[in-house]
Amino acid sequence: MDQTLLMLPGPTNVSNRVLQAISKNVVNHRSAIFGEILTETSQLMSDLFKTNDQSYLLTGSGTAAMEASIANILNPNDKVLNVISGKFGERMRDITNSFGGKSVELNIEWGNSVKPEDIEEELEKDENIKFVTVVHNETSTGVAAPIKEIGNVLKNYNALYVVDTVSSLGGDHVDVDKYGIDICFTGSQKCLAAPPGMAAITVSDDGWKVIDDVDSSTYYLDLKKYRKYGAGTPPETPYTPSVTLVYGLWEALKIIFEEGLDTRIRRHERASKATREAIKAIGLKLFPEEEVSSTTVTAINMPDGVSDSELRGTMRNEYKVELAGGQDHLKGNVFRIGHMGNITYKELVITFSALEMTLKKLGFDIDLGVGVAEVNRTFI
Amino acid sequence: MDQTLLMLPGPTNVSNRVLQAISKNVVNHRSAIFGEILTETSQLMSDLFKTNDQSYLLTGSGTAAMEASIANILNPNDKVLNVISGKFGERMRDITNSFGGKSVELNIEWGNSVKPEDIEEELEKDENIKFVTVVHNETSTGVAAPIKEIGNVLKNYNALYVVDTVSSLGGDHVDVDKYGIDICFTGSQKCLAAPPGMAAITVSDDGWKVIDDVDSSTYYLDLKKYRKYGAGTPPETPYTPSVTLVYGLWEALKIIFEEGLDTRIRRHERASKATREAIKAIGLKLFPEEEVSSTTVTAINMPDGVSDSELRGTMRNEYKVELAGGQDHLKGNVFRIGHMGNITYKELVITFSALEMTLKKLGFDIDLGVGVAEVNRTFI
């Protein structure tokens, strides 16, 4: 396998420690030893979510958890407020519709962030909104939503609060219990820096009350079954979990708490600031306004006169650094630098060296070193 | 992680070669290099299914693939013939009902096998059966269904043929195109001897025609999306796949074809025969009739006067061999020996040594060595 540096908004670079953990022997998933691993891993997930509620591990991608977060609390024709400011907000709407819900769309222009008062307005207009879905970190646009402030608004309404923290948990502030989040989920391959293929979800008491009243068609992602098996002796998952990926997630979570969550979030904040400063110094333009920028991924306007395949292709082929392109209507118009997981100044220095060489090679008049200098300035 | 020998009907012992493969660096799942791995792995899966149709890799357990096999071809109120002769047949019925189908149950006593003419009779009675679900290898009872002969019956009817080969593919005869199977699926952690967490599914042209006419609520397991992304350049999955487990599955499939599929199936047949002969020599009783026994798992009646926890607990704690217990109403009444994946005479010799020592320890009057001798006799 190649040694390309992944500067993607997931999957992120996985440490050797985690890669070694996943190559350990597979054990029986219905044994006491695996029950202990499951218990510890779930507890660390709850610690990371900052909740006293139980977390459950799902074998699947973040989208599996997204489906679980909606399908388990939705009866056909229920009204759902979907905040949509990018591709993942759209996905929450699509899942809402797929399971027969009535989506009320709160559309925000891509690159902007929802405001708590926008949500308040929608809830005032319609008291039948059963739940609100918010994507904390819109990977597609590099914008973070104010989930704490939205939580303060939602405390005045009955609607449940469902938050996608797939690309933010472990890299930005998430406090499930304090923000009043009822259902929160994440993926393994983003800020957690574990391999892809696992997701985690946690549910509040209010969330469970709704789940107990819903007869959902989903079977694989039926959370009632996860609760039942999770409460067993030993704790189990209803279906065979990806045992090796659980080892990986467990190890990745231990690494997070060894670093310390606050330290880790500050590192992400620093990496995002360094990225923005370096981009501006090089003379490129950030896609979103800086005050709403994500701490884990930065979206940048594609410079005039260069195609996505030239820019990202040169980065990948010549300099072995993998950046992400734009999604949907942003395809070709933006590129994205993921700075989540294990990213330090080292990876950013490599990335901006590669970006500067690439732009120079493609005929841009830039002073080599200016971006790297900004990274250094931020991390000094 | 401990070195307990897994003699389970999944997960099975994973070779070092596969464990090393999954500890390789994670690459971008939307890159050319991963597209090649996906293409090769899917092609090897189709070779294993013996089909000219495309196979798709799903990030999830066998149950995820089971849900995909049903939810994608089912409209509410469609009639489905579910053959039920164990826990996994019941699960297919439950998923059918969960997605609003009308399950017609063909119940077979646990430990027996369905007969093709039973299915014919049901199809003659009701021409509105849209599809028939069959579990090839009922892991819960150690019984194999005659999927070739059932396929011959189904060729005379319009109903689609859906077959669960989760615990048989790679260890027993499966020939998707020749048997006329429309939807076939499997899991990574059984006869394929890869870690758990991946599943694969293949669909015939007739199957796709039905899928194109169905508007399913499932989102994560929507096969239309897998087809669309799989046909891209590079081929992709709709959602982030478990990259490291794809490496593992790829390596496991290469190992299978290096051994040769026919040789591998003969090895499984031999292991099952050795197991049955050894069990009889020790004086224990097989749960199903021998002529319908599975080639990959053997279910054995729990001997009188000993509890499941004594028998399996001693095997596990004293001798480090992990057997499976009974499921549902067979709990405590049978125990099961999985002989799938990488199992050779070596693991069987260990298993029967451990079983003989365990029984002796628990007060049974047996001649030490009689089971092991039968294993040797079969493998000589």
Image: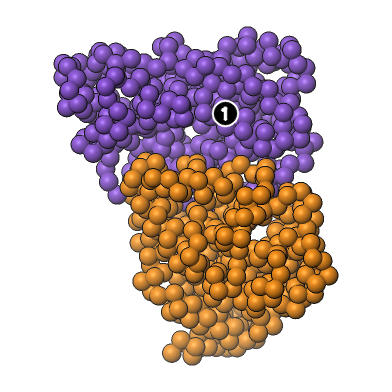
Chain colours: A purple, B orange
Question: How many numbered marks appear?
Answer: 1
- The quadrant in which the C terminus of chain A is found is top left
| Figure quadrant of residue B165 | bottom right
| Residue B302 x, y percent position in the rendering | 69, 75
Classify residue A126 as left or right of residue A20: right
Chain identifier of the residue bearing label 1 in the image: A
For residue B168, above or below residue B236: below
> Residue B280: in sight, yes or no?
yes
| Residue A205 x, y percent position in the rendering | 72, 30
Q: Is mark 1 on a helix, strand or loop?
A: helix
| Residue A11 x, y percent position in the rendering | 41, 38
| Figure quadrant of residue B205 | bottom right
For residue B248, above or below residue A78: below
Q: Looking at the image, which is closer to me, B311 or A83?
A: A83
| Residue A255 x, y percent position in the rendering | 41, 35
Q: Looking at the image, which is closer to me, A330 or A137?
A: A330
User: Which residue bears the numbered disc 1?
Assistant: A90
Residue sitting farthest toward the right: B125
Q: Residue at x 77, y 31 (%)?
A: A77
The three-letter amino acid code for the residue at tag 1 is Glu
Classify residue B226 as left or right of residue B16: right
Q: Looking at the image, which is closer to me, A326 or B158?
A: B158
Q: Which residue is drawn at 29% across and 49% down?
A: A1
Q: Which residue is drawn at 55% across and 69% down?
A: B176
Q: Residue at x 40, y 43 (%)?
A: B29
Badge 1: few (under 14), some or many (20 or more) residues near its Cα, within 10 Å? Answer: some
For residue B213, above or below residue B304: above
| Figure quadrant of residue B254 | bottom left
